[in-house]
Image (spheres, rainbow, N blue to C red):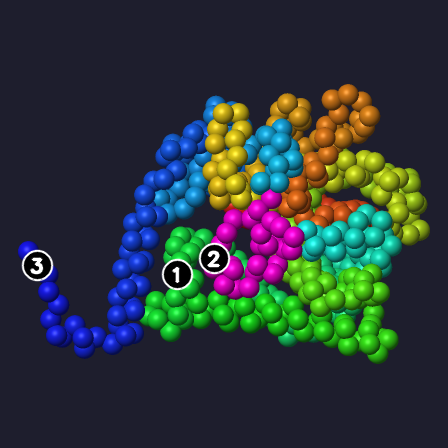
Amino acid sequence: MLLTFSAATTDLSWSQFLLSALLSLIFFVVIAQLTPIWTRYQLPPSLTKYGRTPAQPWVVYAEASKDLGPLITLPRSLMGPPVIVINTAAAASELLDKRSVFACRPNIPMAQLMGRQNNIGFTFYGNRLREMRKVLHSLLTPSAVTTHWKHLIDSQSLTLIQRLLKSPETFNEEVEVSVQEMIVCLAYGKKPDEEYIKTARQVMQDTWTALQHHRWMVNAIPLLQYIPSWLPGAGFKRLAADAKERFERMTRAPFFAVKFEMLNGVADPCFVRLALEDNAQHPTQAHEEVVMYAAGSLFSGMFDTISPIISSFLLTFILLMTHHQAIQRRAYEEIIATIGDHRLPNLYDQSSLPFLDAVIQEVHRFHPPVPLATHSTYAEDHYEGHCIPKKSWVLGNIWAMTHESSRYDRPEVFDPDRFMQRGIQHAAPDPRMQTFGFGRRQCPGLHMANAVIFLNVARILVSFTILPPLEKGDPVPPLLQFVTAFIS
């Protein structure tokens, strides 16, 4: 049968023609995406019998790995790459720490449309990532934390203690507010005004919105990011454009404010000022842009990740202390015996308080604030006979690693003494080597976070007695329950 076009066809406008062509192209892309191309790979064993989204999935993955091995493949939709979970510290060390192929983050087109490629948490592995990490690491080493930021950490902790004395029932909110104020001062040297905090919180919400991977068709069909924003169904592009404008405003405005203050000799010590001064002899626009986005990454990363992590950690610590009064009392007595009761602990006391450090390590181990760490592969790789395809999503199951019975005796028991045997063979490894991530994607703010956690825990112990609530006159510790979320 011969197909012919009628004259009416010529009445179609070019926009209608282009729209039809685009829809046809999308149709064929969808069909291509639905083709199970991953079946040709020898993937790690699949977790099909557990369904797609179990409660506290890190526990389910850890249990499954006992039968299936250190790597497991999650059930997935047809429209997406494999998701592979690493459940042992040995496999994580070999793959996530040692092999650069795992140093990528998953490609999330919605996040890219929001401008997040300029944030270190989303930057693809390459020179830009290395340059930003170099700037961040130079000012966030353990020595830099005590040299440059000790006064900020001290002020944050004092502010928190004072607020808790007035209203202990608002603990979670007080922790987040005090840490967020400290973060803005660290990055830009000034306490934030209410409008800036409001914008930062909206940017944080934008980021979580982009990370809802299955909510956005563009994440499954990246080609959609190139369609015009005026097309029907392209509302996601308009939403992303608004989010990108907020992100750029939050990043650029305080950076240029610090530059202006430096020109006038009135800039307070902060990350931006110190990073620019380090390269003052050979300033370039490219370096300034790296510093600007590194500062923005520092601020946003600590604001929407480190701040909730610290809050989660301190809440977990308090919950556990209601169950372990003897451990709380022993940590308090160590502090008093070491520094007396005439002053509050400071950062220089940390090395003199080994049991308190052991308590902090055990809280990290017992329930890591971020149970799953996300990576992606930029090339195909292999491990123990299994293929890990290019662009796979790879999850490091931190919870499973801190509960390996081969590394921690009786992992279900809260026991800080497991860390009091330093230097002896088979001593328990420090869980903080995993709880802040792996390899080139390890959190650059980990030393800052560790310092904040130590000082707040120490000062809470000497300022308060943590007791379980009473029911009919009897102490009843709360249940040890944790939410299923990115930060638990």
- Residue drawn at (67%, 48%) of the image: 443
Question: Mark 1 and 2 residues: CB-CB less than 8 Å, in contact?
Answer: yes
Image quadrant holding the N terminus, namely bottom left
- Residue drawn at (60%, 49%) of the image: 125
Q: Is residue 73 left or right of residue 483?
A: left
Query: To which quarter of the image does residue 364 belong?
Result: top right
Magenta-colored span = 103-129
Question: Mark 2 and 3 residues: CB-CB less than 8 Å, in contact?
Answer: no
Q: Is residue 441 visible?
A: yes
- Residue drawn at (81%, 35%) of the image: 355
Spatial separation of the CA atoms under disc 1 and disc 2:
9 Å
Spatial separation of the CA atoms under disc 2 and disc 3:
43 Å
Task: Tell me residue 237's x, y (percent).
Answer: 44, 67
Q: Earlier in the sequence, mark 1 or mark 3?
A: 3
Any mark on residue 84, and which? none
Task: Tell me residue 422's x, y (percent).
Answer: 81, 28
**What residue did someone put label 2 on?**
109
Q: Is residue 365 left or right of residue 347?
A: left
Q: Is residue 247 left or right of residue 453?
A: left
Task: Tell me residue 248's x, y (percent).
Answer: 60, 69
Relative to 415, say whether 127 is above or below: below
Spatial separation of the CA atoms under disc 1 and disc 3:
34 Å
Q: Residues within 10 Å of mark 3 (few under 14, many from 20)?
A: few
Q: Identity of the amino acid at label 2?
A: Pro
Question: What kind of element bears circle 1?
Answer: helix
Q: Nearer the viewer, mark 1 or mark 3?
A: 3
Any mark on residue 224, and which? 1
**What residue did someone put label 3 on?**
2
Q: Nearer the viewer, residue 272 or 222?
A: 222
Relative to 325, say whether 296 is above or below: below
